[in-house]
Image (cartoon, grey):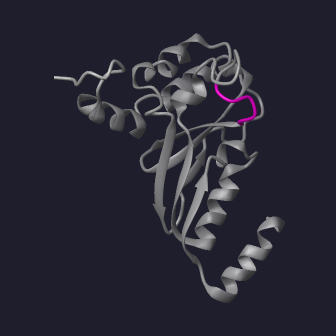
Amino acid sequence: PRQWAPVLEYVARHGKFDFSICAQTLEDLPQPGLAAEFLGRISHEGVVTTPSKYLELQRGVQGPWRGFLHHHWVMTVKGGQLQGFPKVPLLEHEESFDSLANITADTEDLWNTLTIFWKTELPFQDVSQGRLYWAKTSVQHYVEGLARDETDVARERAEPYLAPRTGAAKE
């Protein structure tokens, strides 16, 4: 919060910014909810982008592990709310995430970025609810949370209009 002081002082003197852009940042932070809260305090509206759950759960993006090694979170959107799933070691060896991670193989980079526009505030939920310990039983919590969200709905709606990787138009 101390790092935000200069920005908060500026906003107190001049008013909120009209629009904020937070690109490929929240997944790197230890506490993305704090940044989400401050974005609403300094701006009327904005956009946030993060790697999609598809990209963050894929193997081979940056090495043999899932997603990007330096990322702390897998993000998704449910009910208009940005949700963060801590990227715990438990995810690395759980095969049930492979089918979700590979779902976009035919669309190249189309679904690699999650984008959420917000007004007034950026609703964020840390789905870990402060847990420090993760057991094998937590896998079901992750699977349920990362399945059938707004990202999947958008992807399914768009698929009939997308050409397959070969470049041929779909009928």
86 vs 103, nearest the viewer: 103
Question: In the image, what residue occupies the spot 53% across and 48% down?
Answer: 82
Question: Does 100 sit above or below residue 4?
Answer: above
Identify the residue at the far bottom of this view. 13
Q: What quarter of the picture does the C terminus occupy?
A: top left
Question: In the image, what residue occupies the spot 73% across and 47% down?
Answer: 29
Question: In the image, what residue occupies the spot 29% across and 30% down?
Answer: 162
Question: In the image, what residue occupies the spot 40% across and 20% down?
Answer: 106
Q: Position of residue 137 (x, y in %)?
A: 63, 19
Q: Main secondary structure of the magenta part?
A: loop
Q: Magenta stretch containing residue 57, yes or no?
A: no
51 vs 162, nearest the viewer: 162
Residue 168 visible in rendering: yes
Q: How many marks?
A: 0
Q: Position of residue 84 (x, y in %)?
A: 60, 41
Residue 141 visible in rendering: no
Q: Viewed as shown, does residue 1 lie left or right of 162?
A: right
Q: Viewed as shown, does residue 156 lie left or right of 55?
A: left
Q: What quarter of the picture does the N terminus occupy?
A: bottom right
Identify the residue at the far front of this view. 167
Q: Position of residue 76 (x, y in %)?
A: 51, 39
Give, as a single range, the part of the protein colored magenta: 67-71
Question: Does 107 sit above or below residue 131?
Answer: above
Q: Position of residue 6 (x, y in %)?
A: 78, 75
Identify the residue at the far right of this view. 2
Q: Magenta stretch containing residue 69, yes or no?
A: yes
- Quarter of the rendering containing residue 22: bottom right
